[in-house]
Image (spheres, helix red, strand yellow):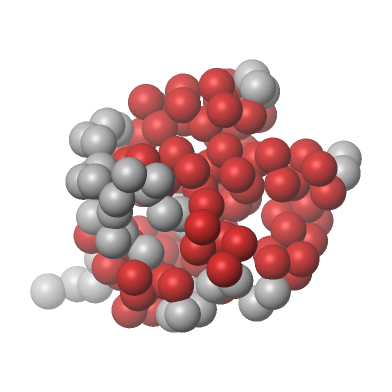
Amino acid sequence: MRFEEFLDAVERRGRLASREEALRVTRATLETLAHRLGGGAVCGLAGQLPSEITQLLTHPSGEPGEAFGADEFLRRVCERAGADRAQTEQHAQTVLAVLRAAVGPAERSALLARLPTDYGRLFDDRWTRRPAP
């Protein structure tokens, strides 16, 4: 998937008003996710994503991620995006749904394994459902 396709998908799925808005919410969501995951977290995703997306997912310092839950994640995305809370949650869900569609199942599982279960509400139900034992 190319970067423009990623943004097109975010704009279309999120019913956003412009490409600029799609870029703003994508950047806010993925940069916040990078801070949560820390350095090296995108290694498995990097080969399947455009370099522009990989850069947004890369923690600038390369250090370990910060431990914060889904509510704090949304607060930070909201702050970065300059949007209200309800809107931010919908936009973050859209960006994460496009991310999910852009990578393979092994990479999706590895990403989810690095996040606490309260992030499940931000991801599509099919992505968070665990197989029966």
* Rendered residue at 75%/69% (across/down): 5
Which residue of the protein is positioned furthest toward the front in this rendering? 61
Give the left or right position of residue 114, taking residue 4 as reference: left
- Residue 34 or residue 131, whichever sits in front: 34
Q: Is residue 121 visible?
A: no
Relative image position of residue 83 (x, y in whole percent): 66, 23
Q: Does residue 123 sit above or below 21 in this rendering?
A: below
Q: Does residue 122 sit above or below 71 in this rendering?
A: below
Relative image position of residue 23 (x, y in whole percent): 72, 47
Relative image position of residue 12 (x, y in whole percent): 80, 56
Q: Which quadrant of the figure contains the N terminus?
A: bottom right
* Rendered residue at 59%/71% (across/down): 50
* Rendered residue at 53%/42% (across/down): 29
Which residue of the protein is positioned furthest toward the left in this rendering? 133
Relative image position of residue 28 (x, y in whole percent): 57, 38
- Residue 10 or residue 32, whichever sits in front: 32
- Count the numbered circles shown: 0
Q: Which quadrant of the figure contains the C terminus?
A: bottom left
Give the left or right position of residue 131, taking residue 25 as reference: left
Residue 73, quarter of the rendered image: top left
Give the left or right position of residue 116, taking residue 79 as reference: left
Q: Does residue 19 sit above or below 86 in this rendering?
A: below
* Rendered residue at 39%/78% (across/down): 105
Give the left or right position of residue 100, taking residue 17 as reference: left
Which residue of the protein is positioned furthest toward the right in this rendering? 17
Q: Is residue 2 visible?
A: yes
Residue 84, quarter of the rendered image: top right
